[in-house]
């Protein structure tokens, strides 16, 4: 099936929206040590800023998802991108740690909205047979953002310092102009727009079991992602004492693995089903664990990081399409983002938890990260068979049926 220009533009905008959102989030993971030094505190205290961003993301998913279900995906996406870009810029002007933490909490609200809104707009617009690979591409936006942050850290940090890193984060605001000029509204939203529909609470009430299951699943997924990524640069700097350049290079390799994993398993899910693709990807983490956590040379650590992220982001690559397909039509901009970000909320203890445990064991980040990832990979493999398989459903037709009721 051939793609229209509008479908291509929607996919580009949603991919870049999530890439630049993640870029703004990950800039902070490289500079925890520097912020701690300037404000006279420790890494664990500054890492609470990451926790705050993660904790506030469900609020953003709810607010921006509700706006997108009520007023449309396109205008909401533009407001959302503008908000997270501005808050990133303001973070660079923080006079003290308290101000920075407040701004990171507000950034979390803005960050929390983008994924659900961009995902709904894209999945409702692209051809059904292309959803798997597009899902992998959208989720690849997250490691793409991490990769971009790695490059900026490696190239610019020595010249602009930690404050300058945040200021670079205002650039995503330019994407708003692209969305305004080239991106149309979702066909499924247009179908539902002029018809009376059940509200958010009524729809969630009707789908309580699905909602609880999806939140538990996404909690495990967020431990999988954040447990393998957020403190990895700190692990390389504190435990192995690598310089900024080496940390940047390993992080780049890690994110190339993540992008490959997301695209491959997203594509594979179109052939073998969403659940089976997630199951296989999650279990790849287990044999990779020793190389990823316990290697001692930069080259072996890079190989381990590459393979681990094929597993982690391979499983994640199927999530945008899977959550959109199992979502109730009436709240497709809200449901996937909300369950994802509530999972983030429950997993938001990860960074300080891992940092605290590592410090108690003589900065042994390797052991702590390995235990978390080993457990979570098994949990995901056990949970995913209980999900529904709705590969290839017609979202516009499904919206028409809901609207006709």
Image: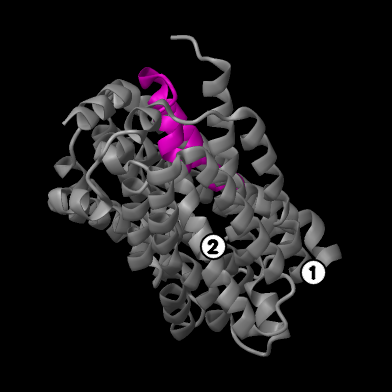
Q: Is residue 279 visible?
A: no
Check disc 1 and report the residue beneath it: 161
Q: Nearer the viewer, residue 73 or 389?
A: 73
Residue 65: give x, y in percent of width and height: 40, 50
Quadrant in the picture for the C terminus: top left
Number of the front mark, 1 or 2: 1
Q: Based on the displayed image, in which of its 4 quarters is residue 125 positioned?
A: top left
Quadrant in the picture for the N terminus: top left
Q: Based on the displayed image, in which of its 4 quarters is residue 391 positioned?
A: top left
> Which residue occupies 51% across, 14% down?
3
Q: Is residue 320 visible?
A: yes
Check disc 2 and report the residue beneath it: 232
> Which residue occupies 32% across, 45% down?
282
Question: Is residue 254 on the magenta stretch?
Answer: no
> Which residue occupies 55% across, 54% down?
301
Residue 226: give x, y in percent of width and height: 45, 60
As helix, strand or loop, the secondary structure at mark 2 comes to helix
Residue 253: give x, y in percent of width and height: 61, 45
Q: Which region is colored magenta? A: 118-146
Question: Is residue 128 on the magenta stretch?
Answer: yes
Q: Is residue 40 left or right of residue 340?
A: right
């Amino acid at each position: 099936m051939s793609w229209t220009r509008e479908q291509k533009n929607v996919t580009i905008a949603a991919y870049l929206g999530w890439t630049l959102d993640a870029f703004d989030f990950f800039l902070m993971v490289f500079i925890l040590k520097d912020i701690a030094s300037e404000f006279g505190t420790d890494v664990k205290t500054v890492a609470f800023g990451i926790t705050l961003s993660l904790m506030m993301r469900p609020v953003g998913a709810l607010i921006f998802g509700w706006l997108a279900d009520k007023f449309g995906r396109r205008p909401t996406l533009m407001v959302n991108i503008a908000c997270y870009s501005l808050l990133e810029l303001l973070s660079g002007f923080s006079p003290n740690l308290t101000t920075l933490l407040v701004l990171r909490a507000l950034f979390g609200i803005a960050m929390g909205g983008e994924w659900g809104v961009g995902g709904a707009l894209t999945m409702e617009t692209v051809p059904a047979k292309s959803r798997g690979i597009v899902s992998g591409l959208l989720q690849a936006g997250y490691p793409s953002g991490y990769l971009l942050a790695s490059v900026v850290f490696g190239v610019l940090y020595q010249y602009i310092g930690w404050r300058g890193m945040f200021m670079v984060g205002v650039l995503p605001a330019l994407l708003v102009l692209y969305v305004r000029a080239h991106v149309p509204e979702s066909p499924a939203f247009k179908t539902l727009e002029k018809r009376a529909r059940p509200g958010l609470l009524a729809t969630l009430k009707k789908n309580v079991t699905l909602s609880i299951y999806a939140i538990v699943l996404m909690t495990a997924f967020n431990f999988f992602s954040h447990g393998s990524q957020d403190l990895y640069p700190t692990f390389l700097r504190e435990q192995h004492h690598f310089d900024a350049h080496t940390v940047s290079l390993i992080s780049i390799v890690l994110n190339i693995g993540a992008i490959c994993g997301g695209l491959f398993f997203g594509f594979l899910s179109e052939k073998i089903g969403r659940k089976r693709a997630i199951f296989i990807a999650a279990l790849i983490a287990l044999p990779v664990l020793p190389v990823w956590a316990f290697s001692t040379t930069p080259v072996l650590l890079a190989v381990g990081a590459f393979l681990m992220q094929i597993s982690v982001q391979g499983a994640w690559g199927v999530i945008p399409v899977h959550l959109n397909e199992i979502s109730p039509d009436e709240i497709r901009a809200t449901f996937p983002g909300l369950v994802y970000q509530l999972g983030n909320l429950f997993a938001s203890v990860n960074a300080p938890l891992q940092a605290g445990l590592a410090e108690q064991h003589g900065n042994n980040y390797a052991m702590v990260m390995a235990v978390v990832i080993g457990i979570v990979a098994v949990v995901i493999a056990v949970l995913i068979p209980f999900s529904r398989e709705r590969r290839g459903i017609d979202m516009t037709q499904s919206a028409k049926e809901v609207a006709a009721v």
